[in-house]
Amino acid sequence: MHEMSLCYSLLDTIAVYQRANMDKCVGLVHVKIGPLSGVEPDLLHQAFLTCRTHSIGDQAALQIHTSAIKVRCTLCGKHSRAVVNRIICASCGSWQTELIQGDEFVLQRIEFIPSEISTEPKERQYVR
């Protein structure tokens, strides 16, 4: 389950932004995952729930946004959507395509909780 190591990397990145924001508590983390990224959304969510307490706090939630597979045909130049294991041009049927979107795993946004609302202690260890 490589989602656990991806989650640790994600949490390390979030912790950097958390420190830059005066250690405000993390409320919601938005990530974008493409179907060709090799990341299983359910496994990533489970890993996040397991690992978050020891890094960014147990109040943090993970919002996973999925993207579609989009390609550009190198023959006809059209852009179209495709599906896993059938990455062809929807316009002309060619298999000669370039992937535009669908293999990403991106941290999109971090939402912080104002300190007066947070129930977390002010001092926390950043331990992985």
Image: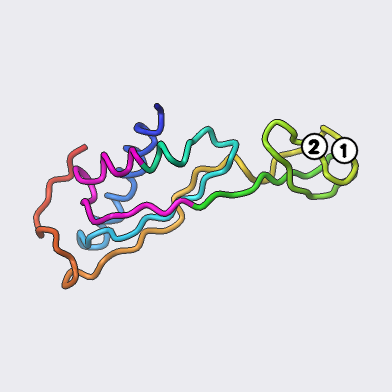
Spot occupied by residue 124 in the image (x, y as percentages of width and height): 12, 51
Q: Split into 4 quadrants, where in the image is the N terminus?
A: top left
Q: Residue at x 26, y 66 (%)?
A: 113
Residue 54, quarter of the rendered image: top left
Residue 30, quarter of the rendered image: bottom left
Left or right of residue 93, residue 66 in this image: left
Spot occupied by residue 62 in the image (x, y as percentages of width and height): 37, 52
Identify the residue under disc 2.
88
- Magenta segment: does it hold 58? yes
Residues under labels 2 and 1: Cα distance? 6 Å
- The answer to whether residue 87 is above or below residue 120 is above
Q: Give the residue type at disc 2.
A: Ile
Disc 2 + disc 1, Cβ < 8 Å: yes
Q: Nearer the viewer, residue 7 or 66?
A: 66
Spot occupied by residue 72 in the image (x, y as percentages of width and height): 78, 44
Q: Secondary structure at mark 1?
A: loop
Identify the residue under disc 1.
93
Q: Which residues are magenta?
A: 46-64
Spot occupied by residue 40 in the image (x, y as percentages of width and height): 48, 36
Left or right of residue 61, residue 42 in this image: right
Q: Split into 4 quadrants, where in the image is the C terminus?
A: top left
Q: Residue at x 70, y 46 (%)?
A: 70
Q: Residue at x 57, y 43 (%)?
A: 34
Q: Nearer the viewer, residue 26 or 47?
A: 47
Q: Secondary structure at mark 2?
A: loop
Q: Give the residue type at disc 1.
A: Gly
Q: Residues within 10 Å of mark 1 (few under 14, many from 20)?
A: few
Q: Nearer the viewer, residue 29 or 83?
A: 83
Q: Earlier in the sequence, mark 2 or mark 1?
A: 2
